[in-house]
Image: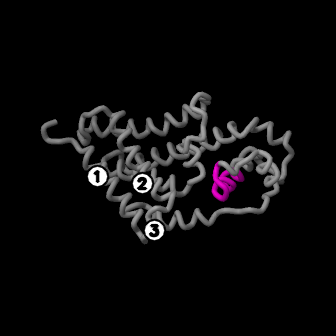
């Protein structure tokens, strides 16, 4: 079973939108800006996010805002970087906590879908084509690669321990990523409205991935 009911999570996070400003008073301004950007994307989409509106909602001057983010592109890069970092941490946690075995691989799939549905704003920025592919930010490249490498490393460990078929681990990881990404987008876009339908699809898809990864006797 998934560790959470992803359908209920989506119902919860889809209501977490605010239209009123959130004046900034103290603490980490950069994080306050990222938090408010997340809320704005939830309510208005990436297209509705502007630095001017963001500064007004947080209650800071343009000069203070531009000290952290020179433009919208820089802000989106920061949102995506935070997203990939969190995703990597969730995947690694699921793998380690699950015992680094086939069941842990299933837990990674569940953790991926859970992350996407809990963090739809980050996920859309990470994979929605809003980032300029020509502007390769080193930190973003590192965190994005790290999230994918966590999956590659898990598959390589399963292969080494005799659990997984001996195909190219990078290709296997890309296949697994494509499957859970598709399930995640069903959840984010609320395409499966029947109670429990998304959870059922996630469990079925992840089990099919695990079974397909299993090493055959001939190997």
Q: Residue at x 44, y 48 (%)?
A: 181
Quadrant position of the N terminus in the picture: bottom left
Position of 97 relative to 217 (above/below): below
Residue found at the far front of this picture: 47
CA separation in Å, label 1 and label 3: 22 Å
Foreground tag (1 vs 3)? 3
Mark 1 element type: helix
Foreground tag (2 vs 3)? 3
Q: Main secondary structure of the magenta part?
A: helix
CA separation in Å, label 2 and label 1: 13 Å
Say which residue label 2 marks.
183
Earlier-in-chain disc, 1 versus 3: 3
Position of 44 relative to 132 (above/below): below
Query: Which color scheme does this rendered protein use?
Result: one colour
Quadrant position of the C terminus in the picture: top left
**Magenta residue span:** 35-46
Q: Is residue 120 magenta?
A: no
Give left or right: position of 134 versus 65. left
Mark 3 element type: loop
Q: Dot 1: within a 10 Å radius of its alpha carbon, few (fewer than 14), some, or many (20 or more) residues?
A: some
Disc marking residue 193? 3
Q: How many marks?
A: 3
Disc marking residue 208? 1
């Amino acid at each position: 079973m998934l560790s959470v009911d992803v359908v209920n999570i989506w119902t919860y996070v889809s209501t977490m939108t605010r239209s009123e400003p959130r004046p900034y008073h103290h603490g980490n301004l950069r994080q306050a800006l990222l938090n408010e950007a997340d809320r704005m994307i939830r309510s208005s989409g990436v297209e509705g996010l502007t630095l001017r509106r963001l500064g007004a909602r947080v209650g800071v001057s343009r000069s203070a805002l531009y000290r952290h983010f020179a433009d919208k592109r820089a802000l989106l890069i920061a949102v995506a970087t935070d997203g990939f970092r969190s995703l990597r941490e969730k995947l690694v946690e699921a793998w380690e906590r699950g015992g680094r075995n086939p069941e842990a691989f299933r837990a990674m799939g569940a953790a991926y879908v859970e992350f996407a549905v809990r963090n739809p704003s980050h996920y859309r920025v990470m994979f929605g084509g809003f980032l300029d592919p020509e502007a390769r930010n080193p930190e973003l490249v590192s965190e994005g690669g790290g999230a994918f490498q966590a999956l590659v490393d898990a598959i390589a460990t399963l292969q080494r321990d005799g659990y997984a078929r001996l195909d190219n681990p990078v290709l296997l990881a890309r296949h697994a990523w494509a499957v859970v990404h598709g399930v995640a987008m069903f959840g984010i876009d609320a395409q499966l409205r029947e109670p429990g339908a998304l959870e059922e699809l996630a469990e079925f898809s992840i089990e099919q991935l695990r079974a397909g990864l299993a090493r055959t006797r001939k190997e």
